[in-house]
Amino acid sequence: MNRTIVHSYAKLNLYLNVLGKRKDNYHDIETLFERISLCDKIILKILPDGEIKVSSNMPGLPQDNSNLAYKAASILQKACGTSKGVEIRIIKRIPVGSGMAGGSSNSAAVLSGLNKLWGLKINRQELVHLAKKIGADVPFFIYDSPFALGKGRGDRIRTLKALNKRKVWHVIIVPRISVSTPSIYREWDKLKVSSRALTQALTMGKNNVKILTSALKKNNPFLIEKALFNSLEQVTASIYGEIGKIKSRLVRLGQRAILMSGSGPTVFCFISSRKEGERLYAQLKKNRFWQVFVAHTY
């Protein structure tokens, strides 16, 4: 076999509590990841002499080591000392810079896919170790779990087996704006010191991850709505007014369990079924400044 196709799934943060800045300038967080059905397709083809090539259907996507999929292949090569190379073709569907970790997911899919394609037989623990070198969100995707808790930088993963059979539907809206994650964290650092309201919000959200996990297991919409939390939402929304516009639109359409994912700008809501998602999609897609998706836990 010299060619394989892998799928690279997006994630949502159903809970994100930023605990504080670390000495390495990253931040300690506590988060609840959900893997969703929205995905990119990646075609991997073996190349000789250690060559790595990246191409995509998306114009402007980096083709060098700044692309996390390229970085994953390079790290795996060096770790295993293989002379094999790879051609990586990425068919993008996950919006870039959306807060759904498309690049991180791509890199995890490349690590796992090349492990098989190159016949390396690396165990999951070793793959996770390599994944941590690429980015904080990458290890989650290596665990191949629909739900997981993330701690540390988000790279210390505990899968939630009790939720393995839980399937949740979402409508997801991605405004056509670019949000810089480092800049959002810098603003959070400033606000944490100066904003009493934000400190209170952090205190209120501190234990909600346990409540949220229980609510998901019991399929309790009221508790899910109350337990959704994102430390960064107030910061991102204060800079990008589109976040508030999306949330207001969803509320007017009767939605209540609404949250921003990661550092934004993606906003999602919980819905009861695909049918409800299609109804909302028909309403929301009229706004040409928004990308709208209906997806479920995967």
Image: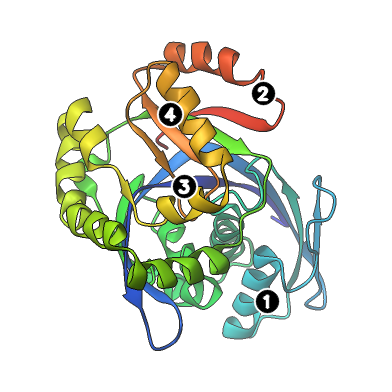
| 22 horizontally vs 245: left or right | left
Q: Residue under circle 2?
A: 287
Residue type marked 2: Asn
Do the residues under discs 4 and 2 have CB atoms within 8 angstroms?
Answer: no
Q: Please rate how many residues cluster around mark 2, counting C-alpha atoms within 10 Å: few if below 14, some from 14 to 19, many from 20.
A: few
Do the residues under discs 3 and 1 have CB atoms within 8 angstroms?
Answer: no
Do the residues under discs 2 and 1 have CB atoms within 8 angstroms?
Answer: no
| 202 horizontally vs 144: left or right | left
Q: Residue under circle 3?
A: 11
**Where does residue 124 sit, x and y in percent of width and height?**
40, 67
Residue type marked 3: Lys
* Residues at marks 2 and 3, CA–CA distance in whole angstroms: 24 Å
Q: Please rate how many residues cluster around mark 3, counting C-alpha atoms within 10 Å: few if below 14, some from 14 to 19, many from 20.
A: many
Q: Nearer the viewer, residue 129 or 244?
A: 244
Which quarter of the image is occupied by the C terminus?
Answer: top left
The disc label shown at residue 30, or none: none
Q: Earlier in the sequence, mark 4 or mark 2?
A: 4
Q: Residue under circle 1?
A: 74
**Where does residue 209 sit, x and y in percent of width and height?**
21, 51
Residue type marked 4: His
Q: Earlier in the sequence, mark 3 or mark 1?
A: 3
Q: Residue under circle 4?
A: 170
Q: Residue at x 39, y 71 (%)?
A: 153
Q: Nearer the viewer, residue 147 or 211?
A: 211
Q: Give the SS element for disc 1.
A: helix
Residue 220 visible in the snapshot? no
